[in-house]
Image: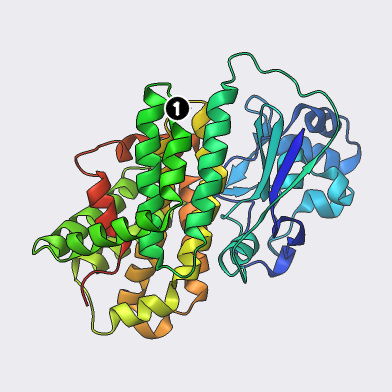
Amino acid sequence: MRYVRPDYYDAFQCTAGSCPDTCCAGWQIRIDEKSLKRYSAMKGPFGSRLRNEIDWENRCFRQYQGKCSLLNEEGLCDLYQEGGGEKALCRTCHVFPRHAEEFQGVREYSLSLSCPEAAKQILVHPGPVRLLERKKPGVSQRWPGFDSGLFRVLAKARSLCFQILQNREKPWRLRAVMVLALAHDLQGRIRRNNYAAGEELFRRYKTEKAWSWFERKLRELEEREAFTGLRQDTLRHLLAILENLRPLREDWKPYLRGVLQAQARGERPGEQEAMRALFPDETAEQLMAYFVYVYFCGAVYDGNAWGKMKFAFASVICVRELLRGRWRQDPEGVSKEWAIRAACRYSREVEHLDENLLGMERMLGDEKQFSLERLFSAAGEGKR
């Protein structure tokens, strides 16, 4: 069995009461079977209260005004304080924001971007993130129907994507279009079940010639007279996807409307310089590395590597544009910290509801609105 985790994973520590947000609001907190049995037998006044605060039919804690019923006025958990500390927590609360994704013979750990402290570690990581691996002896369980050949191809492609994304000698926009194109080209080979052709594809993308080719293509695109309009139209359609997702928090829709209104007003003087400072290439790199790591190999279950890469790229662009919209509303009041806030808000609304994750990937599947060329146009900052 192989275990994989990003190099910042073990350094995470919950900031508890000093956290600017709470992980106890905005979604249902599912309770595992073992914890349900324990809560049903808990004695005393708090045990009685606890049982009243559980929705036993749906196996989750009740919510009041969008928050877990056990969250007190200080933003702390009564179950933790009165029920016996960390051992009293259900599995969901115990592990969050940690997450594990299971594949045959591989378990991959990650931190959720929706947690402010985790997002800080992800976005301000001082260097290119490394994926750490360790092996534990034993026989890996066989998963019926699991396509091991496809998983190996996806894992190799992801590794190459990390190499491309983390080449800081190149601008991020060029790195982004290369990994988009790589996933696009790989999808055709997956569709034909021609996994062996992936090796030849990977060799091509490792060459300096590939960098030169994409640099020329991107420059030709940006020099077109219609480029600015194409870019703005693509950004508008990307943000429109967020409007069509199911909101998890009451403040999300008003926040998003403010961003869209600011977007409609157009670019402000000094905007490009400000955005390069607020959302530098290193931030975009770390953010896209996060989404590629967490989601790309999930294509082993549906064969949609192109869709997973589209989602990763679109997520970075949406976070960037949420930050841009906030800057347009209040240029003096926005700092680098707002990039973390934008990433957290985006993650909370998109990543924590399967309906939204699947819906976003489905809408990105519109090749008329989100073709490779259109996504290329969204990568940069436009003409200067």
Work out whether residue 166 or residue 13 is closer to the camera in this orientation and state it: 166
What x and y, as percent, mark residue 351?
A: 51, 45
| Quadrant position of the C terminus in the picture | bottom left
Residue positioned 77% across, 32% down in the render: 1
Q: Secondary structure at mark 1?
A: loop
**Residue 43's quadrant in the figure?**
top right
Is residue 166 among the parts visible in the rendering? yes
The number of discs equals 1
Q: Position of residue 62 (x, y in %)?
A: 64, 39
- Viewer-proximal residue among 301 and 85: 301
Residue 333 rendering spot, x and y as whole percentages: 42, 82
- In this view, the residue in front, 150 or 61, is 150
- Look at mark 1 in the image and give the residue it sits on: 303
Coloration mode: rainbow
Query: Residue at the spot x=33%, y=82% of the render?
Result: 273
Q: Going 65% across and 64% down the picture, which residue do you hit?
A: 117
- Rendered view: 220 above or below 138: below
Q: Is residue 264 left or right of residue 342?
A: left
Q: Does 273 sit left or right of 96 as displayed?
A: left
Q: Position of residue 34 (x, y in %)?
A: 81, 29
Q: Give the quarter of the image for residue 125.
A: bottom right
Using the rendered image of the protein, determine whether residue 257 is visible from the camera's viewpoint: no
- Around disc 1, counting alpha carbons within 10 Å, would you say few (fewer than 14), some (14 to 19), or many (20 or more)? some
What residue do we see at 53% from left, 27% from top? 150
- The disc labelled 1 sits on which kind of residue? Gly
**Residue placed furthest toward the top:** 144
Left or right of 381 on screen, residue 57: right
